Image: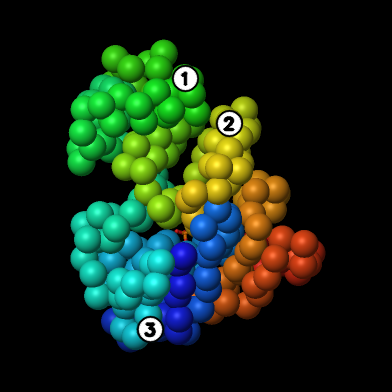
């Protein structure tokens, strides 16, 4: 469903992404692995259209989206949960969720809202709290919930476990697994936390200095070699 071919990006004269090629199928989870600064977030921004790419091609379900603006990509079904969550701190949990449903009709919105509460029961308990008063892990869940309310075809998660306590990492893992089992959405999971990604991903891509240095199915993953790429 998502195909990236020979994507290049530069910050000034620094060649940040070097000929990135990857693909993700519907119903699968692709882990994008790499240590700090290798270009993971830059790649995700290029996929969302927040940053232009210098060359290469990005297609979603066969459609060339390389030159589309972020809102056009979002309308086609790409949801992005950025690193640091970026929820609306002064709005309530409920208002944050409503933002994710801005394009849905009332009836439909109610249905998908119930579904989201099933996935994240904690959010139902906290509907009237301000987003900024939630713990980091709860904010992460809120950000994922808000993205799912748009009913995306592809969800992009940028390091969802970063700075999150273990019990909530488990909850987030459970939700990703459930989404995968449902089979109607592609999941691009950008991570540095190897064990978490290994458990959830069908396929993986490892980046180092802006280049793909390893890729394949989860079964073919050489744990030690991938871990070496992740070690500081
Ligand atoms: N706006 C920018 N201008 C110039 N250089 C940048 C900019 N943003 C990132 N970089 C550089 O590009 C490289 C890739 O950064 P990027 O944030 O994509 O890495 P990352 O793998 O996502 O790391 P992290 O996990 O820390 O977010 C780094 O060397 C970074 O310093």
Q: Please tell me which of labels 3 and 2 falls first in the chain.
A: 3
Q: In x, y percent, where is residue 163?
A: 52, 39
Rendered residue at 21%/65% (across/down): 69
Mark 1 beta carbon near ligand 1 (under 8 Å): no
Q: Nearer the viewer, residue 195 or 165?
A: 195
| Quarter of image, res 28 | bottom right
The residue indicated by pointer 1 is 122
Q: Nearer the viewer, residue 221 or 136?
A: 221
Residues at marks 2 and 1, CA–CA distance in whole angstroms: 10 Å
Crowd band around label 2 with a 10 angstrom C-alpha radius: few (<14), some (14–19), many (20+): some
- Number of the label disc, if any, that sits on residue 202: none
Classify mark 2: helix, strand or loop. Answer: helix
Q: In x, y percent, where is residue 18?
A: 47, 83
| Quarter of image, res 75 | bottom left
Q: Is residue 140 above or below residue 47?
A: above
Furthest residue to the front?
A: 107
Rendered residue at 61%/35% (across/down): 174
Rendered residue at 29%/58% (across/down): 76
The residue indicated by pointer 3 is 56
Q: Is residue 22 left or right of residue 132?
A: right
Q: Is residue 110 left or right of residue 205?
A: left
Residues at marks 1 and 3, CA–CA distance in whole angstroms: 41 Å
On-image quarter of the C terminus = bottom right
Q: Is residue 54 above or below residue 200?
A: below
- Residue 191 in view of the camera: no
The answer to whether the residues at label 2 and label 1 have Cβ atoms under 8 Å apart is yes
The residue indicated by pointer 2 is 171
Indicate which quadrant contains ligand 1. Answer: bottom left
Q: Please tell me which of labels 1 and 3 falls first in the chain.
A: 3
Q: Is residue 11 left or right of residue 35?
A: left
Q: In x, y percent, where is residue 140?
A: 44, 36
Q: Please tell me which of labels 2 and 1 falls first in the chain.
A: 1
């Amino acid at each position: 469903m998502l195909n990236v071919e020979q994507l290049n990006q530069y910050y000034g004269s620094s060649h940040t992404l070097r000929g990135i090629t990857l693909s993700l199928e519907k119903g699968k989870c692709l882990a994008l692995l790499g240590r700090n600064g290798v270009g993971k977030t830059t790649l995700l921004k290029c996929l969302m259209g927040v940053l232009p790419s210098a060359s290469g091609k990005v297609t979603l379900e066969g459609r060339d989206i390389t030159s589309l603006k972020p809102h056009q990509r979002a309308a086609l079904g790409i949801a992005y949960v950025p690193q640091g969550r970026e929820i609306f701190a002064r709005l309530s949990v409920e208002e944050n969720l409503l933002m994710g449903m801005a394009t849905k009709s009332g009836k439909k919105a109610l249905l998908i809202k119930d579904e989201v509460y099933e996935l994240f029961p904690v959010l139902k308990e906290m509907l009237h709290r301000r987003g900024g008063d939630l713990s980091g892990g709860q904010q992460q869940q809120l950000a994922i919930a808000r993205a799912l309310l748009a009913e995306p075809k592809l969800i992009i998660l940028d390091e969802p476990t970063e700075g999150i306590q273990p019990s909530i990492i488990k909850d987030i893992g459970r939700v990703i697994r459930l989404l995968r089992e449902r089979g109607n959405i592609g999941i691009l999971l950008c991570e540095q936390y190897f064990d978490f990604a290994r458990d959830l991903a069908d396929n993986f891509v490892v980046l180092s200095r802006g280049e793909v240095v390893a890729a394949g199915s989860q079964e073919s993953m050489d744990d030690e070699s991938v871990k070496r790429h992740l070690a500081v």
